[in-house]
Image (cartoon, grey):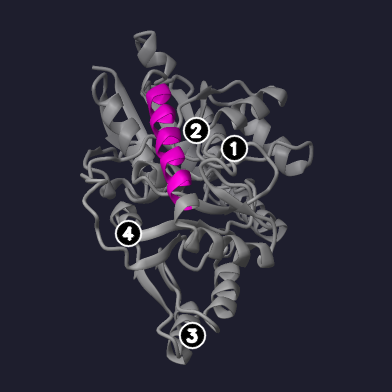
Amino acid sequence: MNKVIIIPHVEINGGAGLYIKKILSKLREYFEVSVAGKFSQSYSCATSENIFFHEKFVFPNYQGVSLIRKNYHLIRLVLNLLIVLSEIKNKKNLAIKSTIVLTSGIQMPLLWLYKKIYPNAKLIILIQENWILENNIYGKISKLLLHQADEVISITKKWSEYAALNNIKSTVYRNEIDNDFVIDLDSGLNIIYDALYIGGDQRIKGFNSLVRMYRKISDYRKIIICIAGQTNEKSRKIINDLNAKSKNGSMIECVGQVNSIQPLLMRSKFLLLPIMAPHFQRAALEAGFCRKTFLIRNFHVEDDFLDLENNCLSYSDDDDLIAKFLLLLDDDELRSKLELNNEKFFKSFTEENIKNFPFSYVKNKFEIE
């Protein structure tokens, strides 16, 4: 049987991890699949120890990453490449003919590396981020690295169209939702949260915007917000101080990292996505799966996951965030309309996706010699 080695960039949780899980499951129908790298133990699959891997060979050039962080990773990448040159030489193995699947754009440097070490392997990369391909040094490096791949797969049509304008050919496999969790949408679960916010205390996910909004609203009315995701000690202190000062029962509850946000969505009125850059919003699909709507910052760009003002509400600044948050909270009729529209949006999205499994070597019964 032909062999495929998947190198995941995250553990098997969250939108990215569940996307990898779906693809891994599909590929196992056709090939002998193994998993390698730092997060290999997280996946229920055989592990591969015969492939060179370096966890610091990453380069983030997607929307929302600061210039300082890009420069830091670029310098670190060059230094680590110099350090492991001799090790790379020793690892060179022309006999490896497996298909190697990288699961994130941040792993692009490995494309160049594997092209040198394993010239007979087929290289696939999944772009799960809103990657930037502008004509600056970072964009040029990204395009150079992407051209080393035999196949580029994106989770959105919009990015694939954007990539085509930059001479990067890609196919699309949009995110499926892990619906192993059985939900009875008419069960009438008690709503205990006004809103669910995901992303922990990450700046890019809008934690600071959430805190500013909560401070203002909780001064004059009771609101309860659930935060899913990792938070550090400093952020937990901020939240604990806010909870301690509450005089009307307002509260922020932190539940930490969760395997699925769907049970939390079912107990929330809506999903809050105050992101700071135009990211792919897979959580919006999960909201649709759970017949929930969401509130998101408006970046005035098209997105596969959004149908603004039809399946969700959007806002422009902090004051508008407060106004739209309260509108969505209090207007049951509007919220119900958006919920039903988002459920329909999710179903149409999923039906199209099932027909479009993109891996050309699966579709064409690609044979590795």
Quarter of the image where the N terminus is located: top left
Q: CA distance from mark 4 to mark 2?
A: 25 Å
Residue furthest front in the image: 333
Left or right: residue 1 versus residue 267 is left
Q: Residue at x 46, y 81 (%)?
A: 239
Along the polypeptide, which appears first: circle 4 or circle 1?
A: 4
Badge number at residue 236: none
Badge number at residue 242: 3
Examine the rendered structure and indicate whether residue 13 appears above or below residue 359.
Answer: below
Badge number at residue 264: 4
Residue 127: x and y in percent read 52, 35
Magenta residues, as a range?
335-353
Badge number at residue 155: 2
Left or right: residue 146 versus residue 196 is right
Query: Magenta segment, principal secondary structure?
Result: helix
Q: Which residue is mark 1?
A: 303
Along the polypeptide, which appears first: circle 3 or circle 2?
A: 2
